[in-house]
Image (cartoon, rainbow, N blue to C red):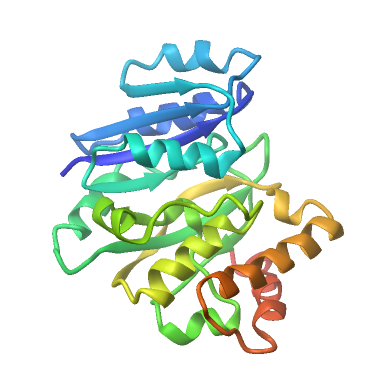
């Protein structure tokens, strides 16, 4: 089973080597790694060129990270597609073989797992752990969502539901998962283990203003899919992060 991994980069010289290395070291035998670069001006592409496992590289101006992801989806030829950001890493070499094994069940169309936020310069220093648990439809209404870097999707699903919505600046991944899981009821599977380490510092949490804007976009994500959250759903979404700092 071929798995396509899409990595969007832009001036990612400080972290992209770790991302490339973790994919090169995967023990799954059939991986298509696609780099979609936003015309970096640093040495990102020079580093990428030193990793011959990379199957495809595109470097051109884009409209942001989700535009880059859409370009990657158009290029991907794997049966299953995952997205790993240029500052994220898989936790060990068996991650993609574990994913492939789960997808041997044809009834599984998507899957997700757990994630750890780690220190920017020390990935061994865990800041919080995002444990998601098995999926239930009601979960989204209580502010739940799976961690997007752990979310793997069969290519046929993207062909059915479409690409990322570029009108959303920070909530396009949330909207996509709402669209796939809640609107279209596409089956998913939970792997109860941490498979991704993400460096802390996402744009939606960078400031109160960004969090306010993210909340507005979260609301739009429901509206775009003709779904109606409860009055407390979008308040619960950031509040669900609090236990992640306690349970590591």
Give the position of the N terminus as an image quadrant.
Answer: top left
Residue depicted at x 47% and y 29% = 36
Of residues 13 and 153, which is closer to you in this image?
153
- In the image, residue 230 lies at what x, y percent? 63, 89
- Residue found farthest to the right: 208
Residue depicted at x 44% and y 22% = 58
Residue depicted at x 57% and y 61% = 129
Q: Is residue 40 visible?
A: yes
Vertical relation: 99 (above or below) 180:
above
- Left or right of 148? Residue 204 is right
Of residues 22 and 210, which is closer to you in this image?
210
- In the image, residue 59 lies at what x, y percent? 50, 20
Vertical relation: 241 (above or below) 96:
below
- In the image, residue 157 lies at what x, y percent? 29, 59
- In the image, residue 90 lies at what x, y percent? 43, 43
- Left or right of 238? Residue 248 is left
- Left or right of 120? Residue 228 is left
Q: Is residue 123 visible?
A: no
Give the position of the C terminus as an image quadrant.
Answer: bottom right
Of residues 223 and 128, which is closer to you in this image?
223
Residue depicted at x 33% and y 34% = 75
């Amino acid at each position: 089973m071929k798995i396509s991994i899409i990595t969007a980069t832009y001036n990612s010289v400080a972290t992209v080597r770790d991302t490339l290395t973790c994919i090169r070291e995967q023990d799954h035998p059939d991986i298509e790694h696609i780099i979609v670069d936003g015309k970096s001006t640093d040495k990102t592409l020079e580093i990428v060129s030193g990793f011959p496992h990379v199957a495809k590289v595109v470097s051109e101006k884009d409209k942001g990270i989700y535009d880059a992801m859409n370009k990657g989806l158009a290029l991907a030829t794997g049966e299953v597609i995952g997205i790993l950001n240029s500052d994220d890493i898989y936790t060990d070499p068996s991650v993609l073989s574990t994913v492939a094994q789960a997808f041997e069940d044809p009834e599984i169309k998507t899957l997700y797992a757990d994630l750890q936020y780690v220190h920017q310069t020390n990935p061994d220093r865990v800041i919080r752990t995002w444990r998601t648990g098995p999926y239930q439809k009601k979960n989204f209404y209580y502010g739940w969502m799976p961690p997007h870097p752990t979310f793997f999707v069969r290519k046929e699903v993207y062909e059915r539901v479409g690409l990322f919505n570029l009108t959303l600046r920070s909530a396009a991944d949330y909207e996509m998962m709402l669209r796939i899981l809640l609107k279209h009821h596409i089956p998913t599977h939970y792997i109860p283990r941490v498979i991704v380490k993400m460096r802390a510092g996402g744009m939606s949490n960078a400031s109160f203003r960004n969090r306010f804007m993210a909340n507005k976009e979260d609301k739009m994500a429901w509206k775009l899919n003709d779904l109606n959250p409860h009055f407390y759903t979008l308040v619960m979404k950031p509040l669900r992060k609090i236990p992640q700092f306690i349970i590591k």
